Image (tube, grey):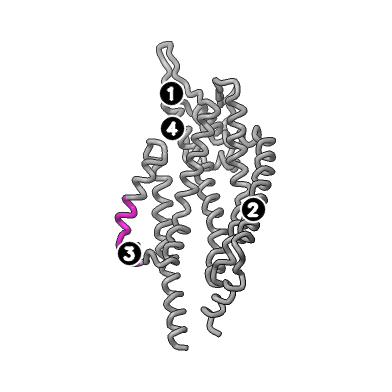
Amino acid sequence: MSATDRDEADIEASRAPLMDHLIELRGRLLVCVIAFAVGFIACFYFAGPLYLFLVKPFAVAAAFHQAVGPHGHASPWDLILGTAGLAPVPHVDGQTVQLIYTAPLEILFTKMKLAGFGAIVLTFPVLAYQLYRFVAPGLYRNERGAFLPFLIAAPLLFLLGAALVYFVMLPFVMWFSLSQQIVGDGVAANLLPKVSDYLNLVTALLLAFGLCFQLPVVMTLLGLAGLISSKVMSAGRRYAIVGVVVVAAVVTPPDPISQLMLAVPLVLLYEISIWCVRVIEMRRKTSDDAEAAV
């Protein structure tokens, strides 16, 4: 029996009536809802420490800004290592960061939004596993083996993008924002962000970088489906770079440093995507040659 025949036999054996599929779907959705609820409660309970954790890059940027003065410049490595806790942060008397809220329930809604976002991140392995277990019976054996690495690569790439935001992007963005303050002649235009606005900025950057870092996963899936080839990707490299620059300009704050921080990794990820698609094509050619020889 050939490999194709064995795959067909596996799928035929996994066939079930529609009602059985609906019952299975209900069970897996219930597991996802319970996991999300548990994650939401846990994240809501620790919403205060989580928010302080997200504010740390702002606090580091503010400490260096106060230490060197409004017209000084902190080393990029000072901001990055200070946020990572690998370098000392200047001690400044009083509070270095002050956030405000202007609505009575703004803090509550901010904590709920933070808890929801954290619950999705925390329970993603459970959600992805339930999705895989539901669709796996309808996949060929080689497709199941190809699907699993993407379940691992997707969250890792998202975490890589999130780390870039937290340790590099946010300190520079907040430093840039603090440098725009106006003080003089009895007037002070100081940065006093709302707690909800700061969380919106953080979540927007995390989502933008995390999703953009899924480029190798998306391109590799397209290569597996035969919708794109490494030759086409290589020929369209210049257009891809222009597209990357446009995306970086849209999803990042309006300063060139932030745009470069997203554009450069995306260009590197595009090159990695070309290599991944090329490997898939080589494996497909080898498999086709082996079947033709038989």
Q: Magenta residues, as a range? A: 231-242
Element carrying mark 4: helix
Q: Which one is in front in this view, the residue at disc 2 or the one at disc 4?
A: 2
Q: Which residue is mark 1?
A: 181
Question: Is 236 located above or below residue 255 in the figure?
Answer: below
Residue at numbered disc 4: 176
Taking the image as drawn, is residue 126 in sight? Answer: no
- The local secondary structure at tag 3 comes to helix
Which residue in the structure is indicated by mark 2?
26
Which residue in the rendered view is the most extreme toward the top? Answer: 186
Sequence-wise, which precedes: disc 2 or disc 4?
2
Provide the secondary structure element on which disc 2 rests.
Answer: helix
**Which amino acid lies under the numbered mark 4 shown in the image of this protein?**
Phe
Instruction: Give the Cα separation between the discs numbered 4 and 1.
Output: 10 Å
Which dot marks residue 129?
none
Q: Are marks 2 and 4 in contact (CB under 8 Å)?
A: no
How far apart are the alpha carbons under marks 3 and 1?
Answer: 48 Å
Say few, some or many: other residues with alpha carbon within 10 Å of mark 4 (under 14 / 14 to 19 / 20 or more).
some
Position of residue 1 measured from the top left corner of the image (x, y, whole percent)? 56, 85
User: What residue is rendered at 44% in x and 30% in y?
Assistant: 177
> Going by the picture, which residue comes out furthest to the bottom?
294
| Residue tagged 3 | 232
